[in-house]
Amino acid sequence: MDHVQRELSQRFAKSYATAAFGYAQAASAAYAALADQTLDFWSQAARAGSSVDDRPARLQLVTGPRPYRSAVSATRPAPAPAVDLVQISQAWAASPMFAPMRAWWGMFPLQGNPACWPMAYAMMSAGVPRTVAMPAAEANVAAFDAASVATASIDRAFSAYRSESGFAVSQVVVSPKTWISALFLAPFAASIKVPWS
């Protein structure tokens, strides 16, 4: 094994290990994000279920023509619609229209290989958390590097069998004696069962 092959093997092993550990880190971060979302969902559902007003509603007879309502309605007054400007602005900023901007600001501080930043940005724009997107993008770049190193190593090993254009080169010279013997044995090949036919 020459010096170049040794360097390619070391680079392949390093890139492959980086990709494997990056994918493992991204998978564990994805599981943690999923568990966090699940627990948040169920805690909000439990809070909403426990905040129900337990006082029984008193019924009152409603007078006058009301064709679309019941004649009996609850005396509990309806809550006045409160305008919460902070909540409205947060909902507006959380809209899908601003997902690319949120992903861009979520990428800072920039870290890792710069080749992985566009891939991480695309994943974060699609809604993947940063803790999952950055390790997955770094692992993808390392896997691409490992594949290119493996391709270079294979190409170098089989370069003797190809020309500069990449096609196989071999000259097959068949003597006339071979042709005559092949033509002679062709009619008898089925009946004789020669091993080369």
Image (tube, rainbow, N blue to C red):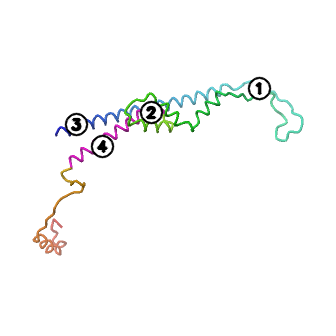
Gap between marks 3 and 4, in whole Å?
A: 14 Å
Specify which label sits upstream in the sequence, 4 or 1. 1
Q: Amino acid at mark 4?
A: Ser
Specify which label sits upstream in the sequence, 4 or 2. 2
Judge the density around disc 2: few (<14), some (14-19), many (≥20) Cα neighbours within 10 Å: many
Gap between marks 3 and 1, in whole Å?
A: 79 Å
Q: Secondary structure at mark 3?
A: helix
What numbered label is drawn on residue 148? Answer: 4
Q: Amino acid at mark 1?
A: Pro
Magenta span covers which residues?
129-158
Gap between marks 2 and 1, in whole Å?
A: 48 Å
Specify which label sits upstream in the sequence, 2 or 1. 1
Q: Principal SS element in the magenta part? A: helix
Q: Which residue is mark 2?
A: 132
Q: How far across and down, in percent of the image, does residue 50 sit?
A: 65, 25
Q: How far across and down, in percent of the image, does residue 181 sit?
A: 12, 72
Q: Secondary structure at mark 4?
A: helix
